[in-house]
Amino acid sequence: MAGHSKWANIQHRKGAQDKKRAVLFSRLSKEITIASKMGGPDPDGNPRLRLAIQNAKGQSVPKDNIQRAIDKGQGGGGDDYVDIRYEGFGPGGVGIIVEASTDNKNRTATDVRTAFSKNGGNLGETGSVSFSFDQVGEIEYPVSVGTEDEVMEAAILAGAQDVESDEESHWIYTAREDLQSVADALAEHFGADVEAKSTKLIWKPQNNIPVDGDSADTLMKLLDVLDELDDVQNVYDNSELSDEEAARLSAE
């Protein structure tokens, strides 16, 4: 089981840790509303809503906000939202997957295509990038829950496939279909006082593509622009920065 690099995939994006909490809360609330509308207000019978609520709690979204988002879905909010995946390529041939939830597919497609074209990338066909990624479950816990060895042991017993750690978090990976069962087992192991920071399905690259210099600068801009679009929920890529390149970008 490998050590996690904080610069891998979406985690290396410049400024990601500085994202305004209001934007994060809005995305988490939007997902709760859509899940509530699509599958009902009971998280026990609605797996998508259950995960959405877990993620909101993991980011300290107030209970009142969560309930309002659920009620909004039942009151007509999220009526016309659909989930769409876009795939494309960034500078250096880096593969990028964009997940969006939108009530206007034409608007979202135009925004995503413009972001790619103006920042050294190009939008591709569905499947042109995702074949080089695996969709897996990812559960993130803060480092305070235990040492890397302790978390690894708990994860293996819970049925996880892999664990990676850095100085901020433990990242536990599962088979797509095992995400909820592993998450439940870990929640029981760590106790009610410990919330996972996130529990979700992600696109994990099978191999990473090294980027540096101007390509790295342009790629970071593209990823930032995509991440700032209102309809975008998640962005994944398969780039890899050297320690020196990551330090340079972090210092800028």
Image (tube, rainbow, N blue to C red):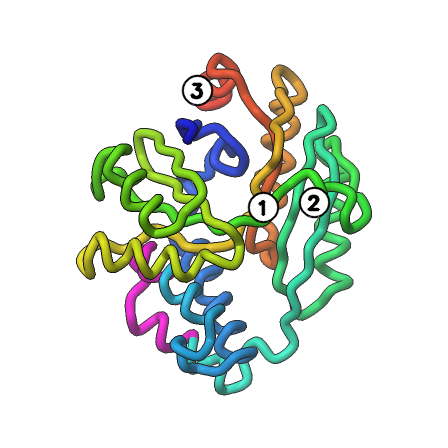
Residue type marked 3: Ala
What span is colored magenta in the figure? 56-69
Q: Write down the residue under mark 3.
A: 251
Above or below, comparing residue 121 to residue 102 in the picture:
above
69 sits to left or right of 194: right
Residue at disc 2, secondary structure: helix
Magenta stretch holds residue 57: yes
* Cβ–Cβ under 8 Å for marks 1 and 3: no
Q: Nearer the viewer, residue 192 or 89?
A: 192
Residue type marked 2: Ser
Which marked residue is nearer to the observer: mark 1 or mark 3? 1
Above or below, comparing residue 69 to residue 243 in the picture:
below
- Residue that protrudes farthest toward the bottom in the picture: 75
Task: State which quadrant residue 58 falls in.
Answer: bottom left
Q: Position of residue 21 (x, y in %)?
A: 38, 52
Q: Residue at x 66, y 69 (%)?
A: 82
Q: Earlier in the sequence, mark 3 or mark 2?
A: 2
* Cβ–Cβ under 8 Å for marks 1 and 2: yes
Task: State which quadrant residue 121 falls in.
Answer: top right
Q: Earlier in the sequence, mark 1 or mark 2?
A: 2
Q: Write down the residue under mark 1.
A: 203
Which marked residue is nearer to the observer: mark 3 or mark 2? 2
Q: Position of residue 203 (x, y in %)?
A: 58, 46
**Labelled disc at residue 214:** none
Q: Earlier in the sequence, mark 1 or mark 3?
A: 1
Quadrant of the drawing holding the N terminus: top left
Above or below, comparing residue 249 to residue 235 in the picture:
above
Q: Position of residue 217 (x, y in %)?
A: 61, 24
Residue at disc 1, secondary structure: strand
